[in-house]
Image (tube, rainbow, N blue to C red):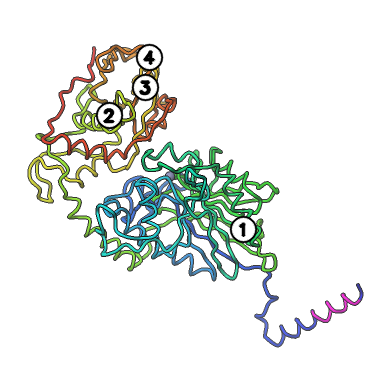
Amino acid sequence: MRAFSKLTAAAAAALVAAGLAAGPAAAAPSTTTDVRLITFNDFHGNLQPPSGSSGRVTLPDGTTVNAGGAAYLATHVKQLRGQVANSVVLSAGDNVGASPLDSALFHDEPTMALLNELGVKASVIGNHELDEGYRELLRMQFGGCHPTDGCQFRDSYPGARFPILGANVRFDNGLNAALPFSVTVSGGVPIGIIGVTLEDLPLVVTPEAIAGLRFGDEVKAVNQSSRLLDLLGIKTQVVLLHQGDNTEGGGPDECRTTPGPATAIATAVSASVDVVFTGHSHQQYNCTVTDPAGKPRALVQGASFGRLLSVVDLKVDKRTRDVVRPATRAHNEIVTRTVTPDPVVQALVDEARTKAAPIANRQVGTISADLVRAAPASGESPLGDVIADAQLAATASNDAQIAITNPGGIRTDLTYASSPAGEGDGVVTYGEAFAVQPFGNIMQTVTLTGAQLKTALEQQWQPQPDGTVQVRILQISSTLHYSWSQSAPVGSKVSDITVAGVPVTDTATYRVSLNNFLAAGGDGFAVFAEGTGLTGGPVDLDAFTAYLTANQNLAPPAADRVTVLP
Ligand SMILES: [Zn+2]
């Protein structure tokens, strides 16, 4: 003991001497290394600054600020990297799919080019990474031209310079269908990055796209990879989880989540995991959960569309190479548009826009007159009729009997006259169809009872807290008819419901096709979420264009599905 003290004293003296010799600025060497993780989620090909509410971030006081746009995102990433010595850029999935035309037309190759340019080190398979199937995911990863469309964006597609992970994605034979984790080194610290997607992925992707794949328990998959990283001596472990919780509002750095799957997973996974980045729910939150060892663990999500960057600053003990957990600092950085857009990324964004223009003008069908979304008193619109009929046709293999869609999902009219692009009268281009159905919603078919169907139709009238009634008339396929009464009270306005001409009874069951937004109870149609026997279908836009192609010279349907009674 005595000898040790002596040695320590001597060492201290030597340090002091060294300090004096080096001048007043010298300090004791740090025992930790700082590593900054910069992650975005659910980018969905938003190369251009997203518009409307998709391009705004809500602040804690309820006001909003414009945010997003790939060139601004790149500038913010560079700034965040410039502030620190060591940083790693990551993505929590849904980089592609349900994306705007500029990216979607090229099978999201421009977006993959962006991620390469941003220096992303790892991403995870989101549900939308599988929209076009597993083979297309492999092409996204490894490169090559699209098997049917070829290389439309550039002469070749080189693939992703980072792994697209999926620890719980397996083939039917049990073998891994994706790399479960990757290791990157930053500031001399080896960092294990585990990717895991939502176990419920089959509910939000069309079955054909994921044939032969299985999606396992998220916690089990993370722990399996985490154990392996433990054995390899990789103590700094990060999870990219493509699953998220909902929130009851709140600013980017508040934690007003309604604890759901993300909180449950982030709380349960191995204590070796230091940070959990999430996605999928497009929410903003900055939470801390307690891991199984009782230590704090960051749980964050950065909204969507490149509006926020989730920044987690870690202090890693140089000796143990493990994260000093209480010293973790996390925040969501708003991708404001007040910075100078990154010139390299701006050129990429402009290139995609320029090259998209001619493809957007591809003819998908013809119409004999305007198909408008505005509706007369009944609430039934010509364009709503056509879209619902298209959705029914596209889900015939799900045994769908009727299709119902939300008016808010129909964004603009299809007009007979030439568009500024110059195509002939009555011609519907892909770009025009895309503008009508831009959200990339996935069709789903559920079983509802007659009573539930009646409830859904009654939910078209929703009493508001201020005493008014919000009316939102659903658009329905030609197989569904009903009447509603102007004078009847809310809750009993609907009568004479028929499906294929047969009166609906409370106990009979019906296969009903809805987009995934409505099927989840969106727009206040809570009863739709009670549907059972859910089967996935195609993207709504694909259903729409297929119908336009199959029904040339399409006329506005007769408005006979909804009857208004006094
Ligand atoms: Zn998702």
Can residue 558 be spotted in the picture? yes
Q: CA distance from mark 3 to mark 2?
A: 18 Å
Q: CA distance from mark 4 to mark 3?
A: 15 Å
User: In terms of secondary structure, where does tag 1 sit?
Assistant: helix
User: In terms of secondary structure, where does tag 4 sit?
Assistant: loop
| Mark 1 or 4, nearer chain start | 1
| Mark 3 or 2, nearer chain start | 2
| Mark 4 or 3, nearer chain start | 3
Question: Which residue is denoted by mark 4 in the rendering?
Answer: 508
Task: Farthest residue to the bottom: give it.
Answer: 21
Q: Which residue corresponds to the image point at 48% horizontal and 62% vertical from the top-left?
A: 121
Q: Are marks 4 and 3 in contact (CB under 8 Å)?
A: no
Q: Which mark is residue 456?
A: 3
* 157 to the left or right of 372: right
Which residues lie in the magenta part? 3-11
Q: Amino acid at mark 4?
A: Ala
Specify few, some or many for label 4: CA neighbours under 10 Å numbering under 14, 14-19, or 20 or more.
few
Q: Which residue corresponds to the image point at 41% horizontal and 30% vertical from the top-left?
A: 534
Q: Which residue corresponds to the image point at 31% horizontal and 64% vertical from the top-left?
A: 346
Q: Is residue 7 magenta?
A: yes
